[in-house]
Image (cartoon, rainbow, N blue to C red):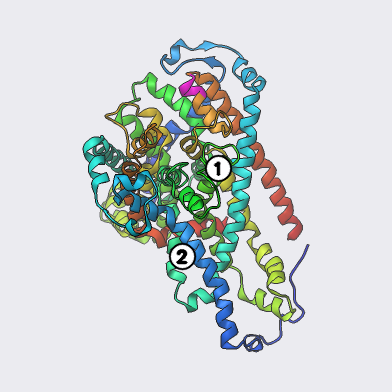
Amino acid sequence: MTVVTSPHHTTDLGGVKSAVRRSPNRRRLRDLLIIIPTFVLLAVTIFPVVWMIFTSLRPADALAGAVPWNQFFSGLGFASYERLFNGTSFARYILNSLMISCISTLFTVILANIAAFGLSRFRFRFRRAMIFLIISTQLLPFVVLVTPVYTLFSAIGLVNSYAGIIIVYTAMTLPLAVFLMLGYFDTIPTVLDEAARMDGCSTLGVIFRIIMPVSLPGIVTVTVTAFIATWEEFLFASVLLTSEQLKTVQVGLAGFFGEYSADWGVIMAAATVAAVPTIVLFSVVQKRLVAGMAAGSVKE
Amino acid sequence: MANSQSTRHEPLLLIGPALIVIALLFAFPAVYNIILSFQKLSPYQSPGEAIWVGLSNFTALFTNNQTAEAAWNSAFWLTTLTVVIRLVLGMAIALLLQSDVLARWKLRGVCRTAVLLPWMVPPVVAVASWKWILDGNTGVLNQVLVGLGVIPRGIPFLADTSTVWWSIIAIVVWRELPFVVIVLMAGLQSIPKDQYEAASLDHAGAWKSFLHVTVPNLRPVITVIVIVTVIQTFNNFVYVWLATGGGPGTYTQVLATRLYSAAFINNSLGQGAAIGIMMSVVVAIFAIIYFRLADRENGARA
């Protein structure tokens, strides 16, 4: 309805910038109108994380009540972390999470590379439909799947087993991984694989020896996204892994603050440990990940 | 690449394994969920012991007035409010981070990274750290408010019906805002500069050029943001479940937490499946209507 067409559109635009000149003082004042909201925004954004880490380092009695301002920073130490690792099974949860996330991420990366190669290098019927179906799984509500998956898995003995959760996590992270790798492979010229085939390489040989090595940046992004998604997952882990021996970090952490007498020092220590891998990994691929996601959303 | 007849089946052999794993989690359970919704089965029984009960899971659902309450909470408090707040705040923050002032003060890079921080934190961690901030006795928010004399004694924000929804909204918006900011910033960067220059030649002020240049250009991006965030939030389980467990009482119960409680706490998998079908239908109807409207809107513009 409102179409922005300007009759002046074709006029010379060179003079526009010089049209407005402000005095330096007014400019500084205007700058503050941007700077102050920015600092408020940053404070609100960062505070919960800073407060979590700070709490995890404070002595237990400082958390029980108001502390005089001059003692605010006194007695900082790792006592909460000692209670976390000596008094709870959190170390075990970390091992479980690491193992589950690493294995399912490995499966996802291998399966995604093979499938994306098939989708990128061959033209066949239902190819587009297949890609569409794979992407559309991202809109399926996970919470709806949890009841039937639990029932099916309990019938075949996959509840309370590493295998069950690894299957779920591989399937959960595969669609996005296939989609990202497909985008990456499409940019790699086919002359590369043709040359390898001339030398007698099999299809899997082409994928693993030729294509994957040149796609390393793409593979790193996919690996990190998949690892983060599985490390963060809560719903399926809490339903499929109920035995104390098998709990993951997120389920263990949620168990801590579900208890009546909450030891917030220990909870914040556990929360800090649970957040370290995702913050570190996210920072590693931040630029590429953000650019990719933004491009995907803007393109559609 | 046509070397032999094996090429015909090769793509299927390559894609097959991934498709089978995906089907194992998405296709089979989605179909089985429909069967389950007509059955009575507890988590401690095997699927073979299920009893067919016809539509009784659904009639139980629709005669229970907690369902309407949970549906309203899901649709209004959890989804509509948080999506609208995320869009408004996200737009303000995206514009703020685009500003030349930040670039001049060399703050742009730092700010853009810092704004992403909540997104790097696992949702369970986000809930944990907010629960501690909002704690009724020793939470820092209450200590500051009491210390400043704003309130006489601490408010249990997550247990009081007048504050609990706004507390959950704060948690959801804090954790999920960065996605909206990133996508809006990408959208802003793709707007051709000459459109703003044309607007300023027409003597359009900042507000007018926002309305007539920025908003129309961002419309497709906003369409994507709304569909993705609405579907994800409507189906979200973890925030409400871990922040309040649906309480106080059933005050913040949403459909996703009702599904979980029905299936795994009241041990009625059929009830859970029925709620799941209801949620899927609601999401599907929303998506269809929304895309129709978006198409018509875009059609009128083209």
Which secondary structure type mostly characterizes the magenta part of the structure? helix
Q: Position of residue A81 (x, y in %)?
A: 25, 45
Callout 2 amino acid: Arg
Q: Is residue A227 left or right of residue B282?
A: left
Asked if residue B133 lies in the magenta stretch, the reply is: no
What is the span of residues highlighted in magenta in the rendered image? B262-266
Asked whether, in this view, residue B157 is left or right of residue A178, the answer is right
Q: Quadrant of residue A235?
A: top left
Residue A7, relative to residue A102: is it above or below? below
Rendered position, A129 above or below B252: below
Question: Helix or strand or loop: what does disc 2 sit on?
Answer: helix
Residue ID at (63%, 57%): B220
Observer-nearest residue: A98 or A291? A98
Query: On the image, numbered disc 2 is attached to which residue?
Result: B112
Asked if the stretch drawn in magenta spans residue B264, the answer is: yes
Along the line of sight, the residue nearer the viewer: B207 or A231: B207
Q: Amino acid at mark 1?
A: Thr
Q: Position of residue B83 (x, y in %)?
A: 60, 49
In the image, what residue occupies the spot 69% across and 42% down? B289
Q: Is residue B188 above or below residue A95?
A: below
Q: Position of residue B78 (x, y in %)?
A: 58, 41
Res A20 quadrant in image: bottom right
Q: Quadrant of the N terminus of chain A?
A: bottom right
Packing grade of label 1 (10 A; few <14, some 14-19, many >=20) is many
Residue nearer the viewer, A166 or A33:
A33
Residue at which label 1 appears: B233
Q: In which chain is the residue bearing label 2?
A: B
Question: Does label 1 or label 2 sit earlier along the sequence?
Answer: 2
